[in-house]
């Protein structure tokens, strides 16, 4: 049977202790060699084929974050789905939140083509961002205190920083009394009644006018920036409360990244940024149906599918879900086993 998503044995610890400590204490982890090289190559080629070349008028029109949702999960590009649900990667996210994979939920996965500054767009092009935190347009609430994070954000890079420029800049947190991380986190354009301004120069001019007493404090964030020196396949894990920003790219270049976010299952106030996965059903290609049928239990859990033992399951729902997905290879044994039906062995995965 063709798998739409790679399935690797569950468990394992792809991140080492230094990655986990860096994420927990400083707010980020930069990880190499987490994904298979051929998966990174395939997805980059698909992105290059899909997105307009740098310098074209079409490129200018999709310069903003996420490329206007052009390539999001679940996608007709199989490698995008594979990358999103690659089990060692999910395991790494779970390590950061110190939770089982089955307690993660996917809330964002999009492949973004970012281009070097295009003078036709002036400062509306997202090239040189203001320092910011990502939570305001991900959660309806405010991030929880530092020691109990609710979400992991991810940037997977497909290019070389040396070629494209545009290394993501971030401010590592220095201990619990770090003035950059004072509470609450509201001193950034777009939060509360402050207007949203993306571009660094415009945002800081606006901030200086609205909150002159804090403008210097924001300057200190820029002074403390570190930059991701990425190569294809590198991954930056970060958080909704980490100060960071996109930096200018070299003119005429294209940088492809995959942006993903996972929340704890319990954190319902963190929104799914895309149309729900089920909305992809009904197409002739049966992409969603095959994806669900052929995913592992952990991968299904990440998409919010009820797990074995969930109160959703009874004889009737097991038979009904089998009637919907059985022809695509869905194995209902684990759900039956968890109901305690005698004579049915669980496949475990
Ligand atoms: O482009 C980047 O490296 C980061 C982008 C970013 O932080 C954002 O758009 O929120
Ligand atoms: Fe951001």
Image (cartoon, helix red, strand yellow):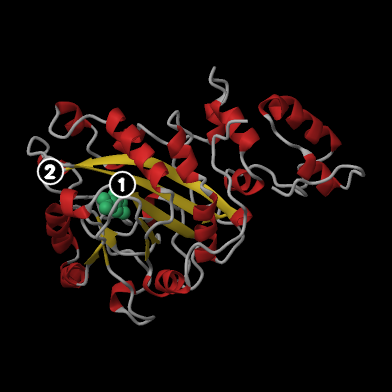
Q: Which quadrant holds residue 167?
A: bottom left
- For image coordinates 44% across by 61% down, the residue present is 142
| Front in this rendered view, residue 158 or 218 | 158
Q: Earlier in the sequence, mark 1 or mark 2?
A: 2
Q: What percent of the width, then of the height, locates residue 244?
A: 28, 61
Q: In which quarter of the image is ligand 2?
A: bottom left
Q: Which quadrant holds residue 121?
A: top left
Q: Which residue lies furthest to the right in this view?
A: 342
Residue of label 1: 158
Q: Which residue lies furthest to the front in this view?
A: 38
Give left or right: position of 247 versus 183.
left
Q: Which residue lies furthest to the left in this view?
A: 119
- For image coordinates 85% across by 36% down, the residue present is 315
Q: What percent of the width, then of the height, locates residue 4?
A: 54, 34
How packed mark 1 is, by other alpha carbons closer than 10 Å (few <14, some 14-19, many 20 or more), is many
Give left or right: position of 211 versus 33.
left
SS for dot 1? loop
How packed mark 2 is, by other alpha carbons closer than 10 Å (few <14, some 14-19, many 20 or more), is many
Q: What percent of the width, then of the height, locates residue 200?
A: 16, 55
Q: What percent of the width, then of the height, locates residue 165?
A: 17, 52
- For image coordinates 12% across by 33% down, the residue present is 55
Of the numbered discs in the image, which one, if any, rests on residue 83?
none
Count of labels in the image = 2
Residue of label 2: 117
Which tag is nearer the camera, tag 1 or tag 2? 1
């Amino acid at each position: 049977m063709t798998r739409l998503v790679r399935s690797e044995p569950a468990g394992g610890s792809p991140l080492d202790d230094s990655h986990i400590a860096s994420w927990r204490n400083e707010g980020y982890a930069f990880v190499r060699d987490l994904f298979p090289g051929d998966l990174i190559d395939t997805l980059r080629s698909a992105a290059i084929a899909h997105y307009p070349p740098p310098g074209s008028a079409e490129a200018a029109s999709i310069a903003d974050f996420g490329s206007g949702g052009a390539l999001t999960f679940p996608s007709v590009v199989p490698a995008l789905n594979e990358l999103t649900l690659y089990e060692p990667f999910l395991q790494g996210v779970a390590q950061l939140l110190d939770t089982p994979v089955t307690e993660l939920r996917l809330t964002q996965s999009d492949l973004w083509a970012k281009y070097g500054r295009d003078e036709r767009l002036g400062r509306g092009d997202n090239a040189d961002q203001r320092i910011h935190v990502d939570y305001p347009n991900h959660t309806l609430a405010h991030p929880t205190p530092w020691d109990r994070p609710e979400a992991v954000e991810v940037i997977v890079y497909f290019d070389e920083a040396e070629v494209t420029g545009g290394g993501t800049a971030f401010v590592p947190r220095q201990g619990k009394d770090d003035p950059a991380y004072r509470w609450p986190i509201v001193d950034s354009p777009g939060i509360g009644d402050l207007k949203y301004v993306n571009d660094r120069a415009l945002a800081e001019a606006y901030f200086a006018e609205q909150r002159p007493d804090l403008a210097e404090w924001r300057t200190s964030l820029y002074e403390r920036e570190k930059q991701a020196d990425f190569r294809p396949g590198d991954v930056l894990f970060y958080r909704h409360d980490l100060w960071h920003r996109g930096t200018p790219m070299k003119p005429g270049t294209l940088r492809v990244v995959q942006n993903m976010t996972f929340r704890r299952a319990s954190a319902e106030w963190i929104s799914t940024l895309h149309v729900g996965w089920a909305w992809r059903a009904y197409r002739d290609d049966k992409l969603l149906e095959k994806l669900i049928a052929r995913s592992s239990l952990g991968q299904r859990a990440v998409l919010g599918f009820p797990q074995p033992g969930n109160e959703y399951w009874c004889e009737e729902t097991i038979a009904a879900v089998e009637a919907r997905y059985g022809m695509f290879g869905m194995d209902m044994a684990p759900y039956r086993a968890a109901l305690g039906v005698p004579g049915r062995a669980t496949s475990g995965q």
